[in-house]
Amino acid sequence: MPRVSEEYLEKRKQLIVNSAALVFSKKGFTEATMKDVMTEAGISRGGLYAHFENIDALFLEVLKMDDEKDKQSLLKIGENPSVLKGIELWVRELFEEMNLPDRDLIRARSEYFLKYTEKEVPYLAERRNGLEQMLLTVLTKGVEEKELSNIIELPIFVSVFISSIDGLMLSEHRELSTNDEKQKKVTMLIEMLQQYLV
């Protein structure tokens, strides 16, 4: 039997994860099945189960991939001369992804987060803490550079800000606002950010 290269296995795994992301964006977490992913990826049952034992493990990998993209986007804030402008661009990018049917994982994430606790899946706490720490670092830079004021407790503000983004994204996913309405809500969120921090 011929040996399969590591590169081939990694490419196949990435194909599975990308295909799963499409399935989860269409069906959510609770309705997606391993069979759906096999069909989308065009691979055999054995090919899928060689990489992932169940739909939960597969979704966790999709979540990590999606989080890495968000992390890279957040890291770009530091490249912007204005911290506030960088955060605004990051928030707008998050909401623009909602318009891309193959990238909208809001429903799937919500279903997964409601099913599992941070005790059951420690990565859930890691991802939240990591995001909070990154935003805190960015905002602290803004305070140090005198772009932002230091009149509120930044760690508390960061936690509330992330929860606001999460809530607005979930609400928008369910309400199906027009693009114009969605942009007005995002603008209001950014204006609230400016009111508290400038």
Image (cartoon, grey):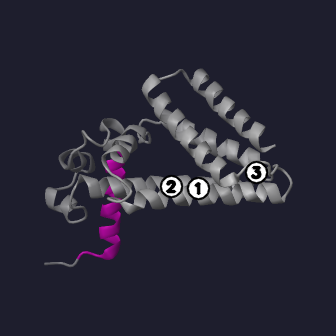
Q: Secondary structure at mark 2?
A: helix
Where disc 1 sits, the SS reads helix
Question: x and y percent of residue 66 in the render?
Answer: 46, 52
Name which residue type carries label 3.
Val
Residue at label 3? Answer: 83
Q: Quadrant of residue 140?
A: bottom right
- Above or below residue 117? Residue 189 is above
- Point out the frontmost of discs 1 and 3: 1
For mark 2, what is the residue? 128
Dot 2 crowding, Cα within 10 Å, few <14, some 14–19, many 20+: few
Can you give x and y, in whole percent of width and height, for residue 55 in the image? 24, 52
Mark number, residue 106 = none
Q: Quadrant of the C terminus?
A: top right
- The answer to if 197 sits in the magenta stretch is no
CA gap between label 1 and label 3 equals 15 Å
Q: What's the residue type where badge 2 is placed?
A: Arg
Q: Which residue is mark 1?
A: 132
Do tag 1 and tag 3 residues touch (Cβ < 8 Å)?
no
- Magenta stretch, residue numbers: 4-22
